[in-house]
Amino acid sequence: MRFWLTLGIAVSLSAGRPHSSVTLLGKGQLPVITADSRGTIHLVFGREDTLFYASSADLGKTFSKPLAVTRLPELVLIATRGPQIAAGDKQLLITASDKAGNVWAWSRPRRGGEWSHAVRINDQPDIGREGFQAVTALSDNRFFAAWLDLRGNKRNKIVGALSVDGGRTWNPNQLIYQSPDETVCECCRVSVAASGNNIAVLFRNWLNGSRDLYLSQSRNGGQSFSSAEKLGLGTWKLNACPMDGGGLAVTGPASFLTAWRRESSLYLCRPGQPEALLGPGRQVALAADKKHWVAAFQQGGSIRLQTDLGEATEFGPGQTPSVTISRGEAICVWENERSISTAVLPLH
């Protein structure tokens, strides 16, 4: 039996906690999941050039039949470049990229209704050609999106935009970070999360030959962002792209936790603190609440869940997991052979 000390918690990677059986939802790729404040679970995924949405009213035990949201010609749907979803206090928002390099948004009332027509978030056309984008919800019907952007010098940088009307319109785009070495890591996903007016943007940088994770934060609802902060004490010198971003979660008021890969290992890290070894793996997703954190990741060809409770659970074959926490349950979704699988892990 092996143990690692992760943020003050001894973690065993030997035996797993009891979990629900794995449920197959149907054909699709790159699922992403989130929970709203009332405990409803919201899921988005892609199939060819169509976006699909499903929901669960029983904490992930069952899901509604996935329904088509819209067709997006040339939908980007490869290597974690997939649709994203956020649940606000009034609206749901789905974002996705096309191969031309545009980031699009669709919204609808959280309680139900029709999805809106597509709204383009980037205010310059065809500048997000890597296809990596993320979105999070704030209070008062606001959303914030961030993506890899080529504007200006045709080098990837981190750009974002705020919507104050539930995703119907978007403020002028703003530069969040530009690497002094010309570009951030081109093939690694960006993550965003929000707590009150505090927004965090997580991305993999390319600086002085290192491919490390950095975090930039806003304390004023996205009006301005701090200088990007490197996460962890170690570094990863690599003359190639690892094609692996990081996970980001809110653990309390203005408090964020990150998870990410360096070489063949995964780490947990709070801003300004040393990293803690999680174990071997890749493609990590992270969720947290005030009591628990859950990391879902790929190890070999299998999906595993690691929690602060000290045990890891293996769900079976798959890739590109996404995870959320609601009412003491961890709900995980992932892709396996171009199909969507789900499972639930109790955190009590």
Image (tube, rainbow, N blue to C red):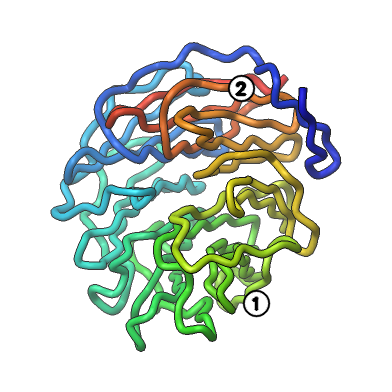
Disc with the residue nearer the chain's start (1 vs 2) = 1
Q: Residue at x 71, y 24 (%)?
A: 311
**Label 2: which residue?**
313
Residue type at numbered disc 1? Ser
Residue type at numbered disc 2? Thr
- Is residue 143 among the parts visible in the rendering? no
* Quadrant in the picture for the C terminus: top right
Q: Residue at x 76, y 48 (%)?
A: 276
Disc sitting over residue 226 in the figure: 1
Q: Residue at x 44, y 16 (%)?
A: 22
Q: Check if mark 1's residue and mark 2's residue have beta carbons within 8 Å.
A: no
Q: Can you give x and y, in whole percent of width and height, for residue 68 in the image?
A: 21, 36
- Residue 130 sits in quarter: bottom left
Disc sitting over residue 85 in the figure: none
* In this rendering, position of residue 2 left or right of residue 115: right
* Quadrant in the picture for the N terminus: top right
| Closer to the eye: label 1 or 2 | 2
Q: Can you give x and y, in whole percent of width and height, for residue 156 in the image?
A: 40, 75
Query: Crowding near pointer 2: few (<14 within 10 Å), some, many (20+)?
Result: some
- Residue 187 sits in quarter: bottom left
Is disc 2 placed on a helix, strand or loop?
Answer: strand
Q: Can you give x and y, in whole percent of width and height, for residue 39 in the image?
A: 55, 30
* In this rendering, position of residue 254 left or right of residue 57: right
Position above or below: 92 against 180: above
Q: Residue at x 65, y 18 (%)?
A: 16
Is disc 1 placed on a helix, strand or loop?
Answer: loop
Position above or below: 84 against 120: above
Query: Crowding near pointer 1: few (<14 within 10 Å), some, many (20+)?
Result: few
The residue closer to the viewer here, 296 or 126, is 296
Q: Can you give x and y, in whole percent of width and height, for residue 150 in the image?
A: 34, 78
* In this rendering, position of residue 48 left or right of residue 119: left
